[in-house]
Structures are given as structure tokens and as C-alpha cells.
Image: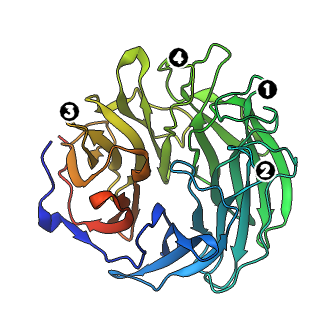
Amino acid sequence: MPPAKAADLVEIPLPAGAGSSLPHLSSAAGGTTLLSWVERSDAGHALRVSTLAEDTWSAPVTVADGQDWFVNWADFPSVVPLTDQSWVAHWLVRSTDAPYAYDVKFSASTDGGRTWSRPASPHHDGTPTEHGFATIFPLDAGFGMVWLDGRATGESSSAHDHASGGAMTLRYAEFDGAGIRQERRLVDDRVCDCCQTDVAVSGKVPMVFYRDRSAGEIRDVSVSRLGENGWSTPTPVYRDGWKIAGCPVNGPAAASLQHRVAVAWYTASDDRPRVQLGLSDDGGASFSRPVLIDGNRPLGRVDVDFLPGGDALVSWLAEDRQGQSALTLRRVSPGGVAGPAVAVASTSATRPSGFPQLLVTGGRVILAWTDLAEGKHRVRSATLAAMPPPG
């Protein structure tokens, strides 16, 4: 796998402290680009965020902090700009001493992150169960949020042990611009326990992508669309037929560009680990047969976005036979032709390396990942000047 040329990857110094982790990239239609992460603080843990101007990250703002946070390598907080000045953030707080009993908390800012509203929760079931893996996305009159909700599972000592209750569910809440909940809905009553969710919006229609879970333990990626009558019946993006008794902790990533939608995911059906990409040219109503992105021992942990010309850009962690891993990218044409895989940064295959982030904004590719040099983790970011074209 050829490495990128040094000149192609240009680091953007980030004011994140030693021990920082869990990066999240997002941008608003107006151009505001945010990078958030978690650091240890005097209060326990803190969610911090910076804005990007040209090639400089601003001094970080602390969104929230606390001693009782649930901090996990796979279930990471976010700060999402709905507009250049209106932002929404979420993080996770323990509800009891049980290992996987925690709630989603969120807060809103109307002044570009200078001040934040009092924290609230999108759910009010009061159960000491898992609530997380949330995705926030803009709506015309506010914002929506989807999350995995364990209220039906019963109290459990393990994220994978729900014998005392029912299945993990996927739920949705809608909020106005002030963060006041307007409605709530069930999206799916049986989903995988701890894979990330993602949302793409095409033609003002939000679509949530997540790892579903059948009664026979088939855990393929599904999609549901939000319409006037609520969320549509979930359908598989593609029937991989991956039967697995536990959660792989490896959710999908999705992006949209006008009527085009891309979704990347990891699967190991037929005992063949691989990263795949599905493409849609009808607003997510249907998806192509998957493009194979990596079939050579990938770890997954995917992300995806569209380049200005319409090609999709996929990122994932690829592992070599020595147990080392690299943040790797591949460019795919609208017709499904893939360019060469390019390793751009080395990282660890262990859990603390987390889920690298990819964002295309203002015609530029922005990357963020957790570097584990010498056993110490710190969030880093860079721009990628060029990627080999498909074909």
C-alpha cells in the first residue's frame, strides 16, 4: 500500500493537550468547520472545540466538563454547527454505577460557542441502561438527533448481555432552534448494541444509517428515511448476511452531495473482513452493489465524504501482518471505479486509536485522528493536498 507523499499531507497544529482523544469533525453550510475532542481536566473530563480559519485552529472552547462522564473509545461526543453561529453538542454521563448505564446529554449555543444552554437529554425513560452513539443533524427549524437506546434491555452489567430484557432500539427526537423537544419517535425496535449511527441529508430528506439486528443475529447495515409520516420501514443497504453473536463495534458512515449519497461500512460475512462502499444517485432510495474498498484484513472504523467533483472519498484503518495500522484513503468515481489505496498516517490497531475523522469542506480534505506515539495519545489534524484519481 503506497504511502502518501510527505508534501501531500500537511499537518494543522491543533491546540489539544496530551491525553486528548475522541475527535469529531463537522461543518455548516456557511463554511464554519469544527473539530471537537475530549481531554482530562480538573473536573474529570472536558469536551473542547476549535474552529478552523485558513490553516489555523482557534484557541479551544470548553463546551462542558464533569466527573461523572462515560468516556469510551467508540462512543464519542460531538459538536455540530447547524449554522455558523448556532451549534449543538452532545456527550455522555453515567446514570448509575453499572458499567454501561449512561445517558446522552446535549447543549446548544447561539453565539458560536461562547455560551451554552443548560444541559438536557433527548430521552426521559429513566432506566439505568445504555443511551449513546448519537448523531445530531440540522433541520429547517432546528435539529434532529438519533441514538441507540437500551430502555427495553433492562439493567445489565454488560453492553452485550441483555438476557434480562429486550433488544437495543434506535430512537429519534426533534428539537426547535432553542433546543426544546418537539417530538420523539421509535425508528427501529431491534438494532445492534454498540455500533455508531450516521445521518445524511439529501433533498432535505434525512436518512439514518446504522447496523441492524435480526432475530437470527444477522447484523447488516440498514437505512431509514424521515418523511411526513415519520421514519420509513428500515431496509438493508446491501444484504451481506453477516451473522455474528455480538456487536462488532464498527458502525457505518454516510455523506450526501445533492442527489448523491454514499455509505461506507465494515463487514466480515463469510469470514472475510472487508470495507465496502454503497453509492446512490437517487437520493438514497436505492444503492449500488457495493464497491470493495479493502478486503485485506481491514479494521474498519470508516468515514466518507464527497469531493467537489462528485467522487467519494473513503477513510478507514487498515492493518498489516505485523499488527500495525494506518489511516488509509481511497477515492471512488460516481460509477464505482476505485483509485489506489493511500496510507496517510500511522496509528495503533488498539482501541485507544478510536475512529479517525474525514471531512471535505471548502474544497479541502480535513483529517483528524488519535496518535498513539510512545503509548501517549493526542489528537492530530491535517489537510490532504491531493488524492490519486480513480481508474
242 left or right of 124?
Answer: left
Image point 38% across, 59% down: which residue?
370
Image point 36% across, 34% down: which residue?
275
CA separation in Å, label 1 and label 3: 39 Å
- 1 and 3 marks in contact (CB < 8 Å): no
CA separation in Å, label 4 and label 3: 25 Å
Of circles 1 and 3, which is in front?
A: 3
In the depicted structure, whether residue 110 falls above or below residue 144: below
Q: Can the viewer see residue 139 in this picture? A: yes
In the depicted structure, whether residue 291 falls above or below residue 111: above
Q: Amino acid at mark 2?
A: Thr
Task: Specify which label sits upstream in the sequence, 1 or 3.
Answer: 1
Q: Secondary structure at mark 1?
A: loop
Instruction: Return the residue nearer the eye: 33 or 201.
Output: 33
Task: Specify which label sits upstream in the sequence, 2 or 3.
Answer: 2
Q: Can the viewer see residue 28 in this picture? A: no
Task: Specify which label sits upstream in the sequence, 1 or 4.
Answer: 1
Instruction: Return the residue nearer the eye: 46 or 284.
Output: 46
Residue placed under numbered mark 2 in the picture: 96
In the depicted structure, whether residue 86 falls above or below residue 293: below
Q: Amino acid at mark 3?
A: Arg
Residue placed under numbered mark 3 in the picture: 321
- 2 and 3 marks in contact (CB < 8 Å): no
CA separation in Å, label 4 and label 2: 32 Å
Residue placed under numbered mark 1 in the picture: 166
The 10 Å Cα crowd at callout 4, few under 14, some 14 to 19, many 20 or more, is: some
Residue placed under numbered mark 4 in the picture: 243
Task: Specify which label sits upstream in the sequence, 4 or 3.
Answer: 4
